[in-house]
Image (spheres, rainbow, N blue to C red):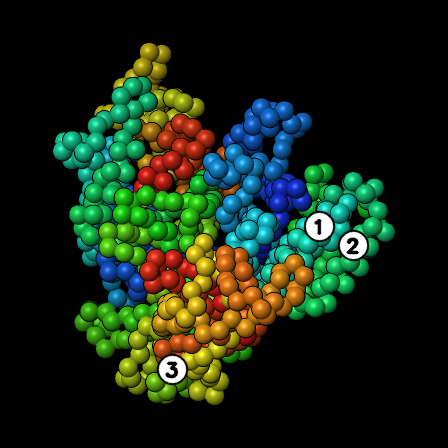
Amino acid sequence: MHIDNNQLLRFTTAGSVDDGKSTLIGRLLYDSKSIFEDQLESVSATSAKKGHKGVDLALFTDGLRDEREQGITIDVAYRYFTTPKRKFIIADTPGHIQYTRNMVTGASTANAAVILIDARHGVIEQTKRHSFIASLLNIPHLIVCINKMDLVDYSEERFNEIIGQFEEFSSKLLMKDVRFIPISALDGDNVVNRSENMFWYQGGTLLNILETLHISSDINKIDARFPVQTVLRPQSEEHRDYRGYAGRVASGIYRVGDEVAVLPSGFTSKIRSINSGETEVEEAYAPMSIAMSLEDDIDVSRGDMIVRVNNQPEPTQEFDVMLCWLNNDAAKPRAKYTVMHTSSEQRAMIKEVVYKVDINSYERLSEDKDLYMNDIARVKIRCTRPLMLDSYRENRNTGSIILIDENTNETVAAGMVV
Amino acid sequence: MSKYYLNYLDELESEAIYILREVWAQFENPVILFSGGKDSILVTHLAKKAFFPAKIPFALLHVDTGHNFPETIYFRDDLVKELGVNLIVGSVQESINNGRVAEERGKNATRNALQITTLLDTIEEHRIDCAIGGGRRDEEKARAKERFFSHRNDFGEWDPKNQRPELWNLLNGKHFEGEHFRAFPISNWTEMDVWNYIKRENIKIPSLYVAHEREVVWRSNSWIPNSEYLKLEAGEKIYTKKIRFRTLGDITITGGIESEADTLEKIVQEVSAMRKTERGDRSDDKRSETAMEDRKKQGYF
């Protein structure tokens, strides 16, 4: 296998068993030969026990005991498969409204979202919800699979009708790259192998599209942002004076000799060296984990951000975010939370709920100010000290925050800087 | 012009290094859970890269069942010496002697489940607040639900239905006194990725992973190695076969496979053609549908 150039693509699938989501994932794994014999045997045995004809592909994605018993996905489950072209990570999330938080979680790192529509039902409330979340989380690519085409006689007309429905509501959303594929996950049409029942469809199969999506531009390579995770100070004779600022490049490209500023202090220096593991390199780019040393002896610690002198984020103490509430305990007005942003932590409070969003109709609800689990709202946050923020649309890594409840230590909310 | 994207092994490496550095930054007293298996060797190798040119700032913690492949212990001691790190050993035999646990009885008795108590006791005794493991989500369905930073309550228990959501690269390791975390830097790696990377980086691994002539008996559908702990049952016979192991656990329960793969190159080829999961030969996972989930909830690796 030529692994040298093979990229990693993360995608999320939202939906319920009824849409055929589990069957679709099972089909992808099965037809791409990513299922092992012992898994197949165990699923075949369970299928037979349940009285299914043949192998129930949905069983490949079975998870925890409660999920098996209830036949649902409760949490995000990760699945892996590799083809000669790419490695894939699927974040498989439940599609019900009470699991919005899991969808948001799965979507947060995805390059692509696969949305399933039942060809018999067309666009429904759930489709709008999933599309809204994909757009809110700024997933670069959206693949809409119109499933169960076998149940609508593989009708091209029906396929186009559903595309029309989708275009209508999605014009309000920010989406860059949307594709439509007519499939039958149950029979495998257009999932991995081309359908013999839909000659009118000229596009690629789902796997083919996943293998060829242009993803190397998904990470911002323009604005150089380097949050410092920790400082490396070796005790050995050989490296006595070395001070390495360790972190993962959040965006952009850094080269030895670049003039940089350390935020929030504002001190400037030049990059002396860049290390990737044990190797010295001339340049580093997102998402590489590196250690950087500077020409001048200045004070740098965890939570600081090293940026280019002529391209700096705005240090901001008060800002607006689109917030998704993730916790069972409702948001407490004016209560203190810890905000985590890149490697920095501050205390913060929710100053104001500007409006809540009805994620099925996209309406703004400006009267309702209480935030419960799965709610999405625009809020104003105020921090004790400035954060080095970019807008989420520009930069997923430096435009995202989480809130932690100081009483329980739980992660209670996720926010995208407006 | 150079390319500005990573291949998938580099991206997995970068993610793992990021997680290891987060552990170091967020916890007081983290350790690497070291079993001598390829996954914990890989994690240790990644830690070396993450902190270079400084030393690995974590001790290695080995839960010693007393039923080891002797080679695992030599390998462990050599590595500890080479890296100059501390080694903490939690001994299952000691837990038995102290009456903390009792040996399982019956035909398929193992010390697998006993490790949980020893591990949790060791974590408490050394005030460890984060144990870094080589668990991977592709191994087993309960592990597919693991977070990078996985919370354990003060009884060491995992609550899979009430996990902290993990978004973007923001890892929340906040905890109260007595609680601890498990961190899984290679969550997103598959068996194939691990082998490709071991080959690429030429990482030293115990020769148990490589095919050699070994004495084995056929039991529960796999080749169990002969050892001082093995009691032959009626009808069982010792064979000499060319065998290698896909995973290394307790010597009493780890089944090997017949193989001709005696180099890393050949192992990678063999694994890519493999049609069975690697834990398929581990009798600890075969006990029930939810064997792993049940053990993990109690505090297993």
Which is more foreground, mark 3 or mark 1? 1
Residue A99 visible in this rendered orientation of the protein: yes
Q: Are marks 3 and 1 in contact (CB under 8 Å)?
A: no
- The lab-note entry on whether marks 1 and 2 share a chain reads yes
Q: Are marks 1 and 2 in contact (CB under 8 Å)?
A: yes
- Crowding at label 2, few (<14), some or many (≥20) Cα neighbours within 10 Å? many
The answer to whether B77 appears left or right of A46 in the picture is left
User: Who comes first in sequence, dot 1 or dot 2?
Assistant: 1
Residue A416 visible in this rendered orientation of the protein: no
Q: Position of residue B227 (x, y in %)?
A: 26, 26
Quadrant that contains the N terminus of chain B: bottom right
Choose between B69 and A191: the one closer to the eye: A191
**Residue that mark 1 sits on:** A117
Chain under disc 1: A
Who's the residue at 73% across and 56% down the image?
A180
Which type of secondary structure does the marked residue at label 3 adopt? strand
- CA separation in Å, label 3 and label 2: 49 Å
Residue type pointed to by label 1: Ile
Which is more foreground, mark 3 or mark 2? 2
**Residue that mark 3 sits on:** A263
Choose between B18 and A12: the one closer to the eye: A12
User: Who comes first in sequence, dot 3 or dot 1?
Assistant: 1
Q: Position of residue A219 (x, y in %)?
A: 54, 69
Residue type pointed to by label 2: Ile
Which type of secondary structure does the marked residue at label 1 adopt? strand
**Residue that mark 2 sits on:** A162
- Quarter of the image for residue A30 reads top right
The answer to whether A24 appears left or right of B125 in the picture is right
Who's the residue at 50% across and 56% down the image?
A373
Residue type pointed to by label 3: Leu
- The lab-note entry on whether marks 3 and 1 share a chain reads yes
